[in-house]
Amino acid sequence: MQFNLADVFEATAAAVPDRVALSYEGENISYAALSGEANKTAAMFAEAGVSAGEHVALFLKNSVEHVTSILGLIKIRAVPINVNYRYTPAELQYIFTNSDSVAVVVEVAEHQNVLATILDQCPVLRTVIVVGETTAALRAAAEARGVSVVAFGRAHELPAVAEFAARSGDDLYLLYTGGTTGYPKGVMWRHDDFFRKPLSGGNPYGDEPRRDLAEIAEAAKEFPEMAFLIAAPLMHGAALYSLFTFFTLGARVVLQRDFIPATVVDAIEKESLNVILIVGDGMGLPLVDEMERRQGEVDFGSLFSVTSGGALWSTSVRDRMLAVKPDLLLRDNFGASESGNDGAFTIDEAGTLRMPPSPKMILVDEALNEIAPGSDDIGYIARIGGVPLGYYKDEEKTARTFPTRADGVRMSVLGDMGKIEADGTIVFLGRGSQCINTGGEKVFAEEVEAALHAHPSVFDALVVPIPDERMGQQVAAVIATYPDTPELTLEDIQNHCRTSLAGYKIPRKVSFVDEVKRTPAGKADYGWAKATVAG
């Protein structure tokens, strides 16, 4: 059958109505209650004039309203648009207009005031829905522009029971990328493909996808009442994938307003957490620092897994987590906004990442010809099956990222590079766009970053190229150190890297900064890093 995400959630809610679906700031909301609140929110959106197929931007931090907005919109076949709340006004104006959002949901006063400054530059926008009090600046700007302002609280006055029009597996889910290498792009997913790929067919811990809603309901009843904390903001693809996956399983999602390592560690004991989802070292490093500080103070007994996705998760950080709790299961998911969940990496003692053989993942050359297993050639990792429709309103980038082979097979080629071993295992080397060519040798930024993160004084680091007259490019790094640690020099960094890296991979220039700039989800800002080392 063709799956719709709203139908899937409702099937789970009907199967385990009394089980806790969402825990947020001390409030526990059952599946039945959450579905009811989403019904109210759906009615509020419909009352505000949002129709099936229209797009609504969610300019929100993590909250119950963020969750009910996502669910409410898909219930009426509208399309939620994820928005990075740290974007500049120009970036926000771009995403609101590029996405053709007819409404924006906003809460934080600072965000409302930023929205007020760009409202007249968003011609399609006709409604602003405000969680809490509306600021004077936003109200004045909305009045001047003729935009309606709706109080989100109106949803609480509407019925919790509702009937909806029939939905389709062809309904659209639009997921905007992180935009770390330019303006974000909207990845167009059919609901059915979203369910089968990012959500692993509703069966992330099994081999076969669920066949129908009845099977989803039965599986939810049998799934243990586990607690999953999503540390990332919901505007991040990995967090959205996890939210829908855990809801499909009938699990309890623990959500926090912001990523604060101390509150995450507090929640391990207070919420009896079983799994924590992070985004690479950007979250893993500060989290393991806090775990080490609180070891012996906090009961880690319930926690059996930490899962990462969407960014580099170095061996050194994993080893430190295992030193705190040796029986932890560490899972490193490989995926992207454009490909969904591709599976979990394995890692060897040298830090090499490998993906087990899969019929949905191949290695291709620049002409999209498949590279045979056992070849020494480096190629591009290509995903096939359940591929998104493309980028919203960008045919050129769609053709480049989602090409179709001569045999009619569509694929997603994102620039991740690797080699394929004789048994079909793919060795992940790194993102081609971050590959540094120094004297003809290829250096992948992720490998050098992992080595830098293993230094006991390094809190965070990014690696980028710098021009070199003789070698073409050289390796450079931006590094932030822990407070109260000895001051490091370029020579210190180079000596450390020589213990695990070949000579041509050693940074030739280092810029020490107070803080390495990342997105709220821990994603690298390589544009900032290049400007920093060039300064």
Image (tube, rainbow, N blue to C red):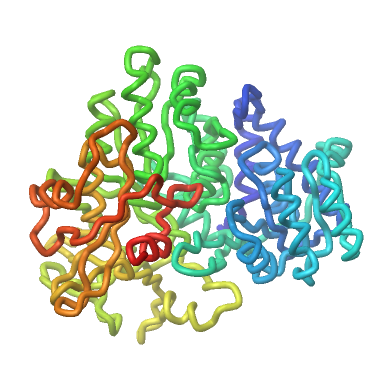
Q: Residue at x 68, y 47 (%)?
A: 71
Q: Is residue 131 left or right of residue 314?
A: right
Q: Quadrant of the N terminus?
A: bottom right
**Residue extending farthest top:** 297
Q: Position of residue 508 (x, y in %)?
A: 18, 61
Relative image position of residue 273 (x, y in whole percent):
45, 25
- In terms of image quadrants, where is residue 26? top right
Q: Is residue 426 shown to the viewer in this render?
A: no
Residue found at x 60% / y 38%: 12
Res 365 visible: yes
Q: Please tell me which residue is depicted at 25% across the width and 37% down the height of the picture.
A: 457
Residue placed most toward the observer, 28 or 120: 120
Instruction: Count the numbered circles shown.
Output: 0
Which residue occupies the foreground of this view, 270 or 46? 270
Q: Position of residue 205 (x, y in %)?
A: 38, 41
Horizontal side of 237 relative to 438 (left or right) equals right
Residue at 63% in and 41% down: 11
What is the quadrant of residue 131 in the picture?
Answer: top right
Q: Position of residue 310 (x, y in %)?
A: 40, 52
Q: Is residue 533 above or below residue 19?
A: below
Q: Nearer the viewer, residue 184 or 5?
A: 184
User: Is 433 situated above or below 117?
Assistant: below
241 displayed left or right of 317: right
- Where's the C terminus, which quadrant? bottom left
In the image, residue 274 sits, relative to residue 14, either above or below, namely above
